[in-house]
Image (tube, rainbow, N blue to C red):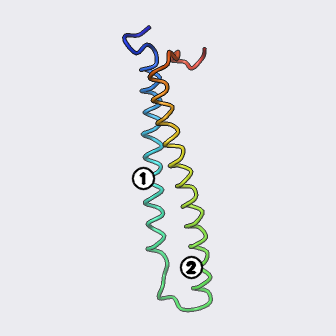
Amino acid sequence: MDGMWGNGLAVSLDVQEVGRKVAQCSDRTEEVLAGFQEIQLVDWESPAGQAYRNSVSLQAVAVRRALDRIREASAAVAVHASAALTSDCPPDGRL
């Protein structure tokens, strides 16, 4: 056992690092999503312009869905980090 928390502390810290990286992905994805507004080219009034905006909108929907999944993953990682803290997990993940 490594101190009061056993090996769970080391595992929890490792999982928390993964959580920070997932949160960074979420932040970057939000920036990308915000960028879709900037590339709408609303002054381009033609069928081609409308087709372009439709395509951008479809891509924005896909990115929004990906962002939702990233947020779900972030929450799951946080739960796992908490659970690891209270368990006696070996640092290599093997039981």
The residue that appears at 50% across and 37% down in the rendered structure is 77
- The image quadrant that residue 10 belongs to is top left
Alpha-carbon span between mark 1 and mark 2: 24 Å
User: Which residue is more in the foreground, 83 or 57?
Assistant: 83
Image quarter where the N terminus lies is: top left
Q: Is residue 56 above or below residue 21?
A: below
User: Which residue is more in the foreground, 28 or 74?
Assistant: 74
Image quarter where the C terminus lies is: top right
- Amino acid type at mark 1: Asp
3 on left or right of 71: left
Position in image of residue 71 (x %, y %): 50, 49
* Residue bearing mark 1: 27
* Residue bearing mark 2: 53
- The image quadrant that residue 14 belongs to is top left
User: Which residue is more in the foreground, 93 or 87?
Assistant: 87
Residue, far bottom: 46
Answer with mark 1 or mark 2, whichever residue precedes in sequence: 1
Dot 2 surroundings within 10 Å: few (below 14), some, or many (20 or more)?
some
Position in image of residue 30 (x %, y %): 45, 58
The residue that appears at 49% across and 27% down in the rendered structure is 83
Q: Is residue 59 above or below residue 3?
A: below
The residue that appears at 51% across and 31% down in the rendered structure is 80
- Amino acid type at mark 2: Arg
